[in-house]
Structures are given as structure tokens and as C-alpha cells.
Amino acid sequence: MVLGVEPLIEDRRDPKRSRVALLIESSNAYGRGLLSGIIDYLRCHESWSLYIPEQGRGDAPSPKLQAWNVDGMIARVENEAIAAAVRELNIPVVDVSAARLLPDAPWVETDDSAIAQLAFDHLSERGYKNFAFVGDTKFNWSRWRAFGFRCCVEASSHRHFEFPLGHSVGAHRQPHLGTPTVPSGDESEESLAAWLKSLPKPIGIVAAYDIKGQQILNLCRDLSISVPEEVSVLGIDNDPLICELCEPTMSSVIPDGRKAGYLAAELLDALLSGRAGETTSQLIQPLSIHARQSTDIHAIDDEIVAQSMKLIRKHACEGLTVTQLIESLPVSRRIFENRFQKAMGHTPHAEIVRVRMQRVKYLLARSDHSISDIARMTGYAHDEYLSSSFKQLEGISPTQYRQQNRRV
């Protein structure tokens, strides 16, 4: 839900200011990014009197919409009810939704083909040969991302899987000015669980958006599918609250909502001032990927090495040693270390240290625990040993790292 619903009183009294409505939800990271971009534009240009209703994604438009008497609008036109209400106003509108229900309006959206390419590259770099996409057939952007991802996988000659079945059938390259008819298939959670169990492992899975990725991670936990050892999961939108609440934390593609909002404001400003030319569509490139634990691994075909990685992730911060690790595996130390080195490119001891150091750095940046407490929590017998190992690997002391990366 969002901010206030009325402009400042002094704004109403200023006839020079354009009155603009923003039908954009702030309940998700992308919507908040759009609003941030609009704010950035207004800080550098003449301001508007803003009307921002309490708007959830796809909600019916406010009954006060006509009474606001606005001069222009930036809107997420997600359904026909919103589209009809906006058309009745007969004012300049910039659409920031993929639904594309106002084909004659200027349109600013994410480049979903570029998002798909970035997602594929991220998983491909981790050595995967099996790829999957989980989408939602109700949304154009999901169909576009699915189609783009499929094209990337097929161009690489690797194996591609998709849920629900038929998700990409009939999909078109972005931009698309209509709503393609796509067989929806069975999208129930039970069907998704059965599909996840049937997939070859290891596999890299892209979710069309973060909440879908969270659902996949929850199902993997319920099905005892190891993440990321058997399945890597990559979301889209990089909503920090969702991604950090996932277990393990979820990697995600970062779309540039801020830039989309800025360009939408720029387009509307041009329309309001009579400077606009032909109607334009602008597709915004994604920024990057925020890598977290759900893709923090290379694809491992060796079952023994995959099993050892699962044990390391679970017990490294309990002071796990290589000797203790091997006691849980059905192979000799020499055979195991050779297989581990071949699969991972480094020793089992180096992997244990890497996992522990990841946790140390997280606690240094995100907590108020003392160095002694952090040493105890990550399997180091003494804080001096932790400090020495940390400085050897990172080039600075734990205290210096905390000062440079403090996030609490």
C-alpha cells in the first residue's frame, strides 16, 4: 500500500503546476523503483502536484479518479477496469505495465528478453546443462521471460524444461501489443511439486518473479531437494525482503525500475508541455544479478561431491574438519579429495573455509556480535585464529571489514 492520497494545499493553489496521478503500487520492489525514478526526475525538473491513491497491483481504480481533475497520469494499467477508467479521462497517460491495454499510449517496460539472457548467463556460468523456467501464464512479462529463456537454452543446445507445460506456446517477442492466448495447464502447487521431483538434477531454475522463486524454495525444502546442490533457484525483481527471508537466501535479477520511472516521467512531461513526438515504446535493460545462496555453487554431477557440499554447508560453522567429513562418505580420503578437486577446482578444506568466511562476513556486516562471539558462532576456537585467517584471505582485519561494510 502506498503514501498519501492528496497533494499539499499550496500545490493546489499554484496554477503553473501540472496535476499528475500515479497509479503505481508500492507493495513490491519494482513498483517502488518506478516511484523512486519519478521522484528523481521531479527533483531535477519542474515539480508536479501528485495524487497517489492507495493502490495494490491490479486493484480497481479509485472512485475519486474523475474528481481529481488531473492533467496527466503514469499508470500500471493491469486490467480492463483500469484501462477503461483511464480512457474516460482523455488525458495524456504513460503506461508502465506489460499488460499493454493502452496500445496508443507511450509505454515504458523492462526488456524481458534481456532479463532472460542475463538469467541464463548466470546459471550457465555455473556449469549447468539442465535449465528450467517457472512462470505464470496470466502475465505478458512472464510469457516474454519464458520465451526469451527458452530461446537462450535452445541456442546453447542444453536441455530445457518449463512449468506449466505449454507456457511459451503462442508467446511472442516483446514488445507485443495484445494479450496472446496461451494454454494455462495445471499450475497448482501439487503439480509444481511433482514436476520439481521429476526434473533431472542438477538443474538451474529461473522463476518469473521473486514470490514464485520463494514458492519453489519452500517446495524444495518440503521435498528434501537440496538447494543449491541439486537445484539452483534464481528469482526476478530482487525484492530484498522476499529474497533475504528465503531459506537459503535467493539470488535475483535486478530490473532497473528507477530508470523506467524516470523515463516515464520524462515522457509525460513532454506530453504535458506539447513537446512529445510520436508515441514511443521504451524497453529498459536490467541492471545485474544480486547473487545469494540459492545459486552459490557450480553444477555438480558427482554424487559424492554433491553430498559433501551439502554436509559442508550444513556443518562448516560447527568446526567441521576434512577428516570428519570423510567419515560420513563411502570413499577413501585420497579418492574423495581427487574427485572434489576435479569437480570444484579447489580442496575440501578450502571450501569449508570459504563457507565459514561467508558467514563471518555476513555477521560482521549485519550484526553487533563481538569478534569473539563471531569466532565461536563460525567454528573458530579463538578470535585470534579467526582474525589471522580473515586477514590472510581478505587482506584486512575483521574490524576493518566491519567498518567498511556496516549494514545495521
Image: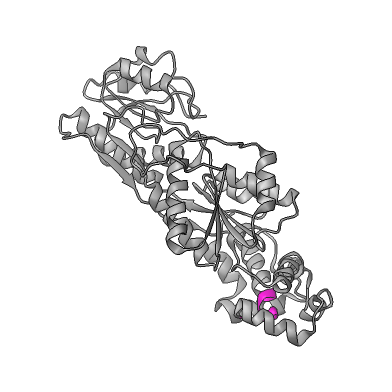
Nearest the viewer among 257 and 171 is 171
- Residue 187's image quarter? top right
Q: In the shown orientation, is residue 227 left or right of residue 401?
A: right
Q: Is residue 387 visible?
A: yes
Residue placed most toward the observer, 162 or 215 = 162
Q: Is residue 35 left or right of residue 47?
A: right
Quarter of the image with the C terminus is: bottom right
Residue 92 location, quadrant: top left
Vertical placement of 198 versus 72: above or below?
below
Task: State the residue at coordinates (63%, 77%).
Answer: 343
Q: Main secondary structure of the magenta part?
A: helix
Does the magenta run of residues contain 265? no
In the displayed structure, does residue 210 sit left or right of residue 337? left
Task: Name the residue furthest right.
Answer: 327
| Rendered location of residue 281, percent (x, y) | 28, 39
Residue 228 placed where, x, y %? Answer: 64, 61
111 above or below 178? below
Indicate whether residue 352 is drawn in magenta: yes
Point out the stretch of residues depicted in magenta: 346-353
Q: Residue furthest bottom?
A: 334
Residue name at image x 26 percent, y 28 percent: 104
Q: Which of 7/342 is in front?
A: 342
Where does the image place residue 291, in percent across and percent down from the top left?
54, 59
Using residue 369 as the reference point, say whether residue 72 is left or right of it: left
Q: Which of the pair 75/81 is nearer the observer?
A: 81
Report the coloring of the rendering.
one colour
